Image (spheres, rainbow, N blue to C red):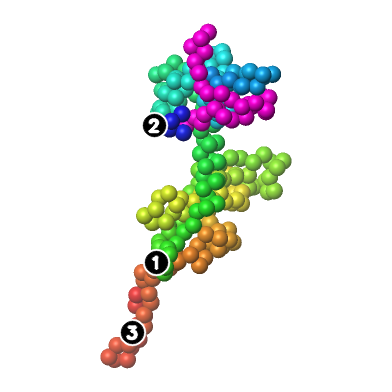
Amino acid sequence: MNDGLMPTWEGAICPFCSKGKVGPLQTRSCNGLPRCRCRRFGCQKYITPQHLHPLFTATRGPEGHSLGTQAAVLLLRLANVPLSSIHLVTDVNHKAIERMDHNLCLLRKSYVEKTLKSMTFGGKKNAWQDVEVDESVFDKKLIPLEEAFSPAKTMMWEQWVGMVQRGKPESLVLIRLSPQPTKPRSPGPGPIKKCDWKPIADQWLKDKQVWVWELPTYVKMKKVVLPNQKRLTVK
């Protein structure tokens, strides 16, 4: 609790009666487990430290594990250890590991969506900055024929565009695009269209002291006049 990963229930409103205040964390004499307790006379409910926690649970049965074991599973998952390896190392039920991994993804998603609202690009006091923009495709799926607008275009792609300010990796912004369906054998949805990119650029980059990259001219046609007045067109 000292690291803030698990907030304390002490002093909070009881989640069961919604009236009484929760007392400090204490160890129960019957089982030796830490519990908080509602101080209201008509309630007196015991509350586990991980009650309503988005990652840790107090489940009974084969999917129920101690708080220390769940913390070990979380640390292994944060170290990118595969789920199958975590199951073998900790002997934790695979469904419990998959549920924690799913909840962890939801937490990351909500954090990104929250910080995305306060993210800004560009410099201050006329200090120009570089912002790198790229797009990528992560997944694809076939559309059922009865739901497709065209029977020839039944492949839907998951395409994202990412922006990050150079030298500031925490400024990463990910925006999901909505590309049009393609033929099943198409290699991809194609590059981002101008109609999709313009509103994104206006929202994030317009008037933000950001450099605009222009396509360089590597080869250019030139007309040359020789001494004998003969004209040549060269690269």
Identity of the residue drawn at 57% across and 18% down: 59
Q: How many marks?
A: 3
Marks 1 and 3, how far apart at CA: 42 Å
> In terms of secondary structure, where does tag 1 sit?
loop
Give the magenta range.
Answer: 5-34
Q: Counting other residues with Cα less than 10 Å from the Cα at mark 3, is it few (<14), some (14-19), or many (20 or more)? A: few
Q: Nearer the viewer, residue 64 or 173?
A: 64
Mark seen at residue 101? none
Vertically, is 176 above or below 5? Answer: below
Q: Pick the quarter of the image with the C terminus.
A: bottom left
Which amino acid lies under the numbered mark 1 shown in the image of this protein?
Ala
Q: Counting other residues with Cα less than 10 Å from the Cα at mark 2, is it few (<14), some (14-19), or many (20 or more)? A: few
Q: Dot 1 corresponds to which residue?
A: 127
Marks 3 and 2, how far apart at CA: 63 Å
> In terms of secondary structure, where does tag 3 sit?
strand
Which amino acid lies under the numbered mark 3 shown in the image of this protein?
Val
Image x and y of residue 228, in percent = 29, 91
Q: Dot 3 corresponds to which residue?
A: 224
